[in-house]
Image (cartoon, coloured by chain):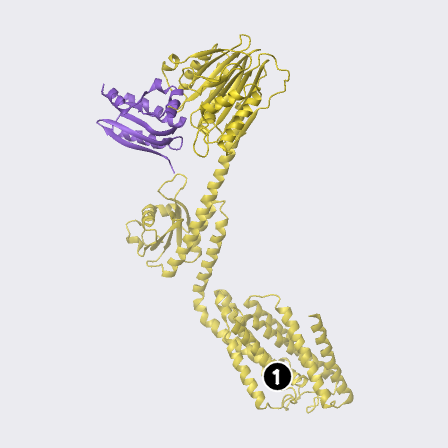
Chain colours: A purple, B yellow
Amino acid sequence: MSNFSVGFRNNGSIQILDLRGELDAHTASELEAAIQKCQAGSSFQIIINGANLAYISSAGLGVFMAYIEEIRENGGDIKIVALQDKVFNVFDLLGFPMLFDIMSSEEEAIAKFEE
Amino acid sequence: MVLLSILFAVCFVLGIVYHLFEWNTGATGPLSLQLASQAVLVVGYTSLYFVLDHIYHASRSRPAKILWTILVAGSVLFAVGSVASRLGGPSVLPGLEAPYNLVGLDPETGIPFVLASIFKMNVLALTQITFAFILLLKLQDLVLVKRSKVSQRNWFAMVGLMAITGLTFFSSRPGSSPGEIQIIAMIVTVVFMLVNSFRLSWIVFLSFKEKIAAIGLMLLLGLMLFLGVGALNESPIGGLIAPGAASYLAMYSYSISYFVGLATLFGVLYSTTGFLSLLFHLPTSGEFTQRAGERATMQSLAHLVGQVFDADKLYATIASAPVEAGSAHVSWLAVLDFKSGSLTPSLVSAHRIELETVENLVDSKALFDEVVLSKTYLHLEHAPTDHRVNAKPGDGIGSLLVTPLIARNEVLGALFSAKEVIRGFEGDDIQTIGILSSQAAVAIDNARLFEQQVERERLSRELSIAREVQQKLLPQKIPALPGLSIAASSVSAQEVGGDYYDFVRLGERKLAIIIGDVSGKGTSAAFYMAEMQGVFQSVSRLAPSPCDFLNHANTALVHSLDRNVFISVIYGVLDLDKEEFVVARAGHCPIASVGQARAARYIRSKGIGLGLDRGTLFRENLEEERIALEPGDVFALYTDGVVESRDETGDEYGYDRLLIILQKHRHEDAEMIHKAILDDLAQFLNHGDYDDDMTLLIIKWHGIEIPESTPRVLETEEST
């Protein structure tokens, strides 16, 4: 029924989450669970890959806001990469680029983490 | 019915007339007349039989009442018989054989010598025959309890044979001994009598007390029939009560007297078999009472399935069921609280034992856990030796039976039944309690579903109240400013939503406008929307510019908003004197704007959503845009529900379509443009429901005062 999924990948200590499908009020809890899992595993360097993310609603955006503070307090960050134009527009309208590192590729984000 | 009664009366009177004729002439009539008078009597009494049949079979009574009715009828017979037979002197001549021993009748021909004899004969015959009919008809009710086709056939065959046997004596002289045919007929009749006298199913349904009463009544009936009626004038007792009665009957109609005799014989047989059978059934009464208890308990439980308004009453009934059914001495009930989802059952009701006692004696939780796992009953034959039972002999828990209450494959609770003795539960007890448990589970399940339904209805009522309240937070009237037309609407995907728009008049020709969208939807969004409304109504009058307002609003809201909640807002001030529109955008969808000579475009100034940043980023990134108003300028403010609405294929309405439709309708007034956009959107979606809150606000600056100043109707709708 849910057309949203989160895939887990690692790059060294960096946890990469591949989002697929539509992230809205109904599926937001799945992303929450995924980020909580990262936190539980003490992975605070998280890259969200949105290459296959077709849609995001305001409730979906809220998930990032819910965890970013805690993750940054733990010396980590959430970086968002490879968003489709339409999805990026939603992030952009709300001013997310001012709050998050939103990049075009994973490599860029990994490099930023490794600085 | 009435015809039959009349027929009987006529025949009866004809009988008397014939006897009067005999008395008058002092001789018997010709043979044909004699036979005709007999035929008249047979027809008459046959109709009486059917009349009585009709009267008695309208209702069915309990066995004791049936027996009682027969006894009363018998007593009436005795009373009438004893009075009638003694009228005008003695009836019986000693030393002669019946039926020739009657005073006032010619022993050979039966011709009455005196009027009194005619009266006696008719009255005695009528009462005896009526009693015989009542006896048969009443016994029929008993014999045909739990009737089958065969039993019914046997009964009517017996009555028929009795009648036929009687008729074989039709032409016989009273007192003559029966011939071969008559004897054969009598033997066959007696065989059927025997068959019918073993039809005693009604005994099984009697309680112990009722059986005792029935034994007494049966005994009385047997004695009355045998000693009294059976040989009314030959037996010592019958002869004392109504001497000569039977002889009178024989003289009256020999056929009918045989029928009466056979009916009485059947009565004697039936009361004998009934009496013996009752005696033998006495010891099994307890068993039967238990079965009756089980059935009654089942019924009350089944009834309760529909009576689920009172949980305590339901629990009490279930807890008492095993005891009421006679399968246990004490019982109690433990159920799970479905609201809290707790896995620990709570003891809710106990029968014949205190709940505290149960708690002290038995670890109900441990036993419950075991039946939850096994999903079948748990039988502790020797309960005191089980580690989960802390009972000593005398505590009343010798054996314990725990049955899970399972409905829709879910264990809702457990029913505990205990007996004082060890190994107290037999197979049928366990079976009974098992059935009770499944009934109880259905009842509890129904009660829960009902409660949930009530809860749902309550919630939906609350939500509709919330919706009304929220509608009041939106502007009830669109402000009218000279040279300006405004149209607005807001639709919630659910009862309540997070979209907001509002106006505050800052001066005669100055208006503050806001449109906002709380992230998420539903109730939580609605609360934040209400908060936003409070901030707007209070802060907008104090803040000189859109940036000021939004900075204040962010500061005010950031601490009350949940971390994952934010509000996107556009705040604008229309100043008609300066002819400018100053706007700032806090993360909201950009204003679509079109002028008469200017192409449609989006006004996308920088800005972060309210609540997203708690520091200085918000302030630093906020921009104001000043738009010089030119006549014909149109501004469309909207929430993402408009541009993100999707058709069946998943395509979004999108920003481009909005600009195109705006461009196309820019010459019209705000109302028309508003309608054009919604129509276009509806056409695009091709279905009636929206999956997001959707708000659309159109402002058009005409530059000159528009002549018609009809108040604009506010459009607020809901799609659910």
Residue displayed at 62% across by 86% down:
B168
Total labels: the figure holds 1
Q: Nearer the viewer, residue B108 or B605?
A: B605
- The N terminus of chain A appears in which quarter of the rendering? top left
In the structure shown, which secondary structural element does the residue marked by tag 1 occupy?
Answer: helix
Q: Which residue is mark 1?
A: B166
Placement of B275 over or under B18, stated as above or below: above
Q: In the shown orientation, is residue B356 left or right of residue B203?
A: left
Question: In this rendering, does residue B397 appear at all?
Answer: no
Front residue of this view, candidates B293 and B565: B565
Judged from this view, the residue extending furthest toward the left is A12
In the image: residue B627, left or right of residue B395: right
Is B218 situated left or right of B343 in this image? right
- The quadrant in which residue A106 appears is top left
Category of crowding for the residue at label 1, using alpha-carbon neighbours closer than 10 angstroms: few (below 14), some (14–19), many (at least 20): many
**Res B348 visible:** yes
Q: Residue furthest right?
A: B24
Residue A21 rendering spot, x and y as whole percentages: 36, 32
Q: Quadrant of the C terminus of chain A?
A: top left
Residue A9 in the image: above or below residue B110: above
Q: Say if B170 sits above or below B652 in the image.
A: below
Subunit of label 1:
B
Q: Position of residue B302 (x, y in %)?
A: 48, 53
> Residue B268, how many percent across, how many down?
54, 78
Q: Quarter of the image holding residue B553?
A: top left
Nearest the viewer among A1 and B97 is A1
Callout 1 amino acid: Gly
Residue B382 left/right relative to B96:
left
Rendered position, B353 above or below B674: below
Measured as percent of width and height from the top left, residue B284 is found at 43, 67
